[in-house]
Image (spheres, rainbow, N blue to C red):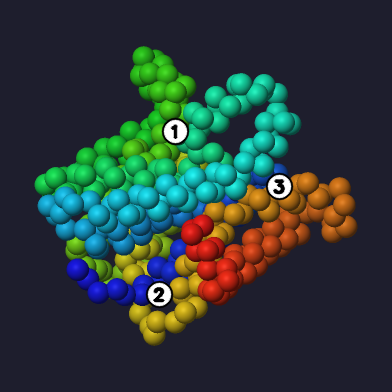
Amino acid sequence: MELKKQYIGLDVVKFILAILVAMRHMIQIFFTAESRGHLVIGSWLSNLAVPSFFMMSGFFLFRKVEAGQKDGYVIKKYSFKIIRMYLIWSVIYWPINWYDWYHGETGPAEALLKYIQSFFFSSSIAQLWYLPALLTACLLIWFCYTRGMKIWQILVTSSGLLLVGYIGDNWYVNEMLPHSMYLKLMEYNKYFLTMRNGLFYGTFYVAAGLWFAKHPQRLPLWASAAGSVAFTGLMYWEVVHIHNTNIILSAVLAVSCLFMAASEIGGKPRQLYTRLRVMSEWIYLSHFYFFYLFSWTLPWNPVPVNNKTVLMMLMGATVLFSWLMTRLSETKRFGWLKKLI
């Protein structure tokens, strides 16, 4: 088993990407559709985030798992952690779920059924979809890897699932499908809600994390950094011309190069980088509460509301809160906060 190592570059990248996710959701809610932020952050750069999170999770998980290791201790511990986080944060977001139901048009019974369906097949609230998706992807890849599938076979199979998800998630593409296939896709969405999940989206990136965990050879830092920039540019082309906003195929190349570049960045281990990693978790999980608090207090807010002030207030509050929770969790009295992430 590889000795524990601090990956400084991955900690910093994860922190930046968590901010991009929060900005994506903020822009979708508060910015006008014509805003440049919708394209640059909402549809383009923020789509580096979730694939990177999947890949990093797969990398760190499978550094602890060997082929043929079927005892399941590592995956059980990891699974329970994800389930605990999903349940805790689902409960934390119940007041917002209730608020949305109370101000919506559905009755209690219908709202409850929709919540249960979304809880199992999507998420209890927008950004939490990543947790059940991560659990599904990790369990599937772990099962295949420990039962004897070669890594390249897992990658080929999961890339096929990613392609199916890409077609099914993108309206610009799926409307070109034969009518019978389109109807089947709509029937799938009726029950399972989305293809942006652990099966069709997460498996490939977790499998890529497995590949990097078992193949430490990397491109030179300059080459992977240049590739990350070039392929991120290709993502922009795909967003503009193929109208992808969620699953972007060229993100496979951009995120892989970004991961290689970030994992090669060295330096002296510092607590700062550990704190950035913890803050990224708090930012990702908590940011929707700040959006609702801002909306609820809008009638009494003396600050002129525009894109710049909304960005500064919401992101400033989110980052400050994540820093406060991180520092508090380091104390004996509030050490229990670590259980939330």
Q: Which residue is mark 1?
A: 121
- At horizontal 25% and vertical 46% (from top left) the residue drawn is 141
Nearest-to-viewer mark from 2 and 1:
1
- At horizontal 50% and vertical 39% (from top left) the residue drawn is 123
Q: Is residue 294 left or right of residue 127?
A: right
Image height of 277 relative to 157, above or below: below
- At horizontal 46% and vertical 63% (from top left) the residue drawn is 14
CA distance for labels 2 and 3: 33 Å
Residue 137 lies in quadrant = top left
From the top left corner, tell me how far across and down residue 307 is, in percent. 73, 54
Residue 8, numbered circle: 2
From the top left corner, tell me how far across and down residue 191 is, in percent. 44, 23
Q: Which residue is mark 3?
A: 292
Looking at the image, which residue sits at the far front?
Answer: 333
Q: Is residue 299 left or right of residue 46?
A: right
Image height of 13 relative to 112, above or below: below
CA distance for labels 1 and 3: 24 Å
From the top left corner, tell me how far across and down residue 261 is, in percent. 35, 69
From the top left corner, tell me how far across and down residue 68 is, in percent. 12, 52
Q: Is residue 120 visible?
A: yes
Q: Secondary structure at mark 1?
A: helix
Nearest-to-viewer mark from 2 and 3:
3
